[in-house]
Each structure stands twice: as C-alpha cells, then as structure tokens.
Image (spheres, rainbow, N blue to C red):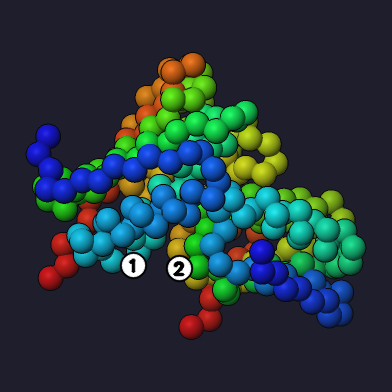
Amino acid sequence: MQFTSFLQDGRLTVALTGEIDHHRAKSYIQAIAAKIEAYAPAVCVLDFQEVSFVDSSGIAVVINALRQMTRMGGKLLVTGLREQPMKVFRASGIEKIVDIKEAVR
Amino acid sequence: MKFDNYMILEFPSRSANEAFARSAVACFAAQLDPTMEELGDIRTAVSEAVTNCIVHAYPQELGTVMLRCRILKDNVLDIVVKDKGVGIPDVDQARKPMFTTGGAERSGMGFTIMESFMTSISVTSEPGKGTTVHMRRKLQRRQ
C-alpha cells in the first residue's frame, strides 16, 4: 500500500493512491486510524487526487475516518476527487455529511 | 435470448480477484465503445457484486465466483455474478441503503450503487444455495 501523510499546523493530510476496493480498504482504514490516533489533528484531509477508482469500500474508509474525527471533536475534509470516485460518493449521499471537493483540473 | 458475444469467468473468492473481475469486464465491454463514464459505472457495479460474494457468500472459506457477460442487441451489456455461498435470507433488506452485516469496514451501499449505476438489476437468493445478481447496462451509441 502506497501511503503518504504529513502534519502541518494541526492539519493531517493523508494522500491515498490507486484503486480503493474491499481488497485494499481494510489496510487504509487501519493506517488512517493509526495516524489520527497518533497526531490527534484538528483537521484531517483525505486527498483522493491520485485515486483512480473507488467502490463502496471507499465510502467505508471515509466514514471510519469521519467517526474518529467527530469523536475527537475534529473535522474531516475529502479533496481531489476525480470523476468516478465523485460519482460513487454522490450516489451514496456521503456528501451530505462530509465536506467533499472535486479534483482541480 | 440472442447475443452477439459472451465471456465466462470463474475464480476463487479471493479479494485480489475484485480488481481482476472488474478489469476483465471492462476489457470485454470495450468492444461496445463505451464512454469513460459508462466504463467507470460498469467497473463499479461489478466490483460491488463480486465483493459481496467474497465478503458475504463465502464468509469462512473460499468458494467459486462465476461471472458471465453477454452483449445483447441494441448495445446492452448483460452481466451475471453468481455464487454457491450462504445466500441472503432477506434480499429486500439487503438492498436497503446502509444495511450491512459486514461490520465497520463495509458501508452497506453496495446494492444502492449497483442500482444507480446500472440500467436494471435483479437479485435472487436461496439460503444455503447461493445468490445470483443479474445486471444490465444499455450503452449509448456514439455518433
């Protein structure tokens, strides 16, 4: 799993890559949870710029991070969504509970 | 049922095969000259159906997932994903958004996504015998 993250001014950015399906989601869920736990950021940004595909497993990745950030009194942002991931997230209604931004072209 | 072309795949319910299955269907569908969006929709729906077999149909052991794609007349892609797993006791309940028996790692949105990305979907299941998901997607003809 390729995975980079950085912390700046209490803001944790996690950059996801490739295709996020059930096969890969579990390790992402665990890795993101460990980062949030370790840094306790005020804001966590999940950057989907390099994610070319998600299915409903990608929704579970976002929901798990959202639950954790909400529990800690923080905020979750999802950025850089390409067309296919954006469509999946819209179909799920998740944009009503998380701040989601499309990729800048 | 008349069809122009078909393909049949069979593979064990290993999660590594999720990517293989959706890519194989996308390659097969390419002969219909789909748009990128149509291809993305088909890949997503196949991923959901195959993941259901892997997570739910065979929760304890590996089983066989069967996948059949056909090209029907008028640019219709017909996809069947079938397992001989545990079956779904209540299909209507399983299709409801946010319903899952898969725990925190699942979102319960699989069927909702299949429904919204495909033209039609039917699900038949018998506990102890298995589940069949039958989906169709009509592709737009490009000028």
Which dot marks residue B57?
Answer: none
Residue at (49%, 48%) from the top-left corner?
B17
Task: Tell me, yes or no, whether the two marked residues, 2 and 1, touch with CB atoms within 8 Å.
Answer: yes
Please, is residue A81 above or below residue A59 in the view? below
Which residue, given by chain and number where applicable, does mark 2 sit on? A83
Which dot marks residue B36?
Answer: 1
Q: Which label lies toward us, 2 or 1? A: 1
- Figure quadrant of the N terminus of chain B: top left
Residue at (26%, 56%) from the top-left corner?
B29
Chain ID, mark 1: B
Amino acid bearing label 1? Met
Q: Quadrant of residue B121?
A: top left
**Does residue B45 show up?**
no
- Figure quadrant of the C terminus of chain B: bottom left
Report the side of B10 relative to A74 (left or right): left
Label 1: element kind: helix
Q: Quadrant of residue B43?
A: bottom left
Spot occupied by residue B106 in the image (x, y as percentages of width and height): 62, 42
Report the side of B47 relative to A68 (left or right): left
Label 2: element kind: helix
Spot occupied by residue B127 in the image (x, y as percentages of width and height): 48, 16
Residue at (33%, 53%) from the top-left corner?
B25
Please, is residue B14 above or below residue B61 in the view? below
Give the CA separation, mark 2 to mark 1.
10 Å
Q: How many marks?
A: 2
Chain ID, mark 2: A
Q: Quadrant of residue A65?
A: bottom right
Please, is residue B64 above or below residue A71 in the view? above
Please, is residue A94 above or below residue A7 in the view? above
Q: Nearer the viewer, residue B24 or A88?
A: B24
